[in-house]
């Protein structure tokens, strides 16, 4: 089965007319839809709303942007200081999205959306530029193939479609399941590559509760219909953890399956994750306390946090746990007398003495009860 061609054909049809089988019911923010042309709204397909994770000032990358609805929603949320990039491989969908760029720019007070042609599993390759190269240098023999291969390598290196560490938030709406299984690991690694340290992921997609058998995977209609290419629910989370992400979680999980085929449940979820900071692990004397309710938890980097204990952490982990995605789970304790940092290598679960993390504003009392500030 040619997965790529079946997907291109199905979504080219969807760009021309509404195809109900390509979408799940989703409640979007009606205020963000008011400015978007009906033509885009009628031919949009998705299973979630990743736009709700967009922050003002973000540079956002939408994987499989289609007709551009989520991009134009995100453009309203990022404001004048932000920017939105939509990547898609389907010419008909790109034409639909680009057709309204001028009018949307006027409504938003400036054009802050750019649609680019590319494979979401190879975000360095500018496919539009490659097509222009091929028009001038057709591949008719082995020498032509080598010339193309060399051009691709140079283009990825010198003028990537999406540069390293250039994006604050990667979003997608029911598209990762359309990528061939052999390319899914590379896809997640590409998401990691383009995100800045501290960058976030919000991926709405379809997952299965059981592994999908080969005869379903070989059905072109089921694959292009966002079903047989779905990640298995545990494997979806694990793919992002293995790529180096932390705080990988299902922020949204539909209790009712979208479809059930041969007893396998397919449902809509939204996965969130964070790219950790690429800074040294330095110990200034910080500590964190896990609030509960579980007796202890461990994070994606192997640290263990018993409930109610002041656990020694490096400054990088301190920021992640108290300011990042775990913030509502932990209490932070800054060092009372921060000194020169040292490379952090304390064993997991090491306690930090309370005397080292008392508030600098707390009064100090002697044994006779006399206190001073």
Image: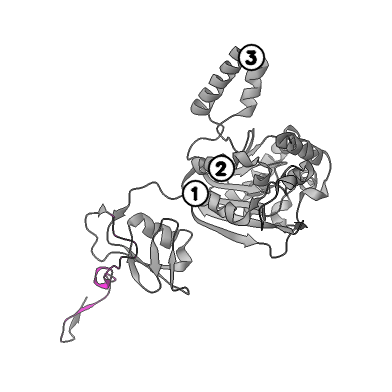
Q: Is residue 167 above or below residue 149?
A: below
Give the tally of numbered discs. Answer: 3
Q: Is residue 295 above or below residue 103?
A: below
N-terminal-most mark, 3 or 1: 3
Q: To which residue does mark 3 refer?
A: 137
Q: Nearer the viewer, residue 348 or 41?
A: 348
* Residue 156 - label: none
10 or 75, which lies in front? 10
Q: What is the crowding at mark 3: few (fewer than 14 residues within 10 Å), some, or many (at least 20)?
A: some
Q: Is residue 111 visible?
A: no
* Front residue (pair 364, 163): 163
Relative to residue 284, is residue 27 drawn left or right?
right
Residue at the spot of label 1: 242
Instruction: Specify the quadrant of the image occupied by residue 115.
Output: top right
Local packing at callout 1 (Cα closer than 10 Å; few below 14, some 14-19, many 20+) is few
Please report the bounds of the magenta region as a residue range: 344-368
Q: Is residue 37 left or right of residue 279?
A: right
Residue that badge 2 annotates: 185
Identify the residue at image location x=77%, y=41%: 220
Residue 216: image location, x then y, percent: 74, 47
Whether residue 372 is situated above or below residue 110 in the rendered picture: below
Magenta segment: does it hold 367?
Answer: yes
User: CB atoms at circles 2 and 1 under 8 Å apart?
Assistant: yes
- For marks 2 and 1, the one nearer the N-term is 2
Query: CA–CA distance between discs 3 and 1?
Result: 39 Å
Which residue occupies 25% across, 68% down? 356
Report how far apart the C-alphas of labels 2 and 3 lie in the structure: 31 Å
Query: Whole-Å distance between the Cαs marked 2 and 1?
Result: 9 Å
Give the image location of residue 142, x and y in percent. 61, 14
């Amino acid at each position: 089965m040619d997965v790529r061609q079946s997907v291109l054909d199905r979504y080219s049809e969807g760009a021309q007319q509404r195809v109900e089988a390509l979408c799940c019911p989703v409640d979007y923010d009606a205020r963000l839809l008011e400015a978007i042309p009906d033509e885009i709204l009628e031919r949009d397909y998705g299973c979630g709303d990743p736009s709700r994770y967009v922050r003002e000032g973000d540079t956002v990358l939408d994987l499989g942007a289609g007709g551009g609805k989520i991009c134009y929603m995100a453009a309203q949320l990022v404001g004048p200081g932000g920017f939105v990039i939509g990547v898609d491989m389907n010419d008909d969908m790109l034409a639909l999205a680009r057709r309204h760029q001028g009018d949307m720019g006027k409504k938003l007070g400036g054009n802050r959306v750019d649609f680019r042609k590319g494979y979401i599993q190879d975000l360095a390759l500018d496919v539009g530029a490659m097509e222009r190269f091929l028009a001038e240098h057709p591949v008719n023999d082995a020498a032509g193939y080598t010339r193309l291969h060399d051009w691709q390598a140079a283009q990825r290196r010198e003028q990537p479609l999406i540069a390293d560490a250039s994006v604050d938030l990667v979003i997608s709406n029911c598209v990762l399941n359309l990528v061939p299984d052999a390319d899914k690991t590379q896809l997640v690694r590409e998401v990691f590559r383009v995100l800045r340290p501290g960058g976030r992921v919000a991926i709405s997609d379809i997952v299965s509760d059981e592994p999908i058998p080969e005869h379903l995977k070989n059905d072109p209609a089921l694959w292009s219909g966002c079903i047989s290419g779905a990640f298995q629910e545990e494997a979806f989370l694990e793919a992002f953890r293995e790529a180096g992400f932390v705080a990988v979680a299902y922020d949204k999980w539909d209790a009712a399956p979208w479809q059930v085929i041969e007893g396998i449940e397919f449902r809509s979820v939204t996965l969130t994750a964070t790219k950790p900071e690429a800074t040294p692990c330095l110990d200034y004397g910080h500590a964190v306390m896990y609030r509960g309710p579980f007796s202890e938890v461990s994070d994606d980097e192997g640290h263990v946090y018993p409930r109610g204990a002041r656990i020694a952490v490096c400054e990088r982990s301190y920021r992640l746990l108290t300011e990042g995605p775990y913030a509502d789970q932990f209490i932070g304790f800054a060092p009372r007398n921060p000194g020169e940092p040292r490379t952090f290598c304390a064993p997991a679960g090491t306690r930090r003495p309370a005397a080292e993390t008392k508030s600098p504003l707390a009064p100090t009392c002697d044994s006779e009860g006399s206190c001073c500030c």
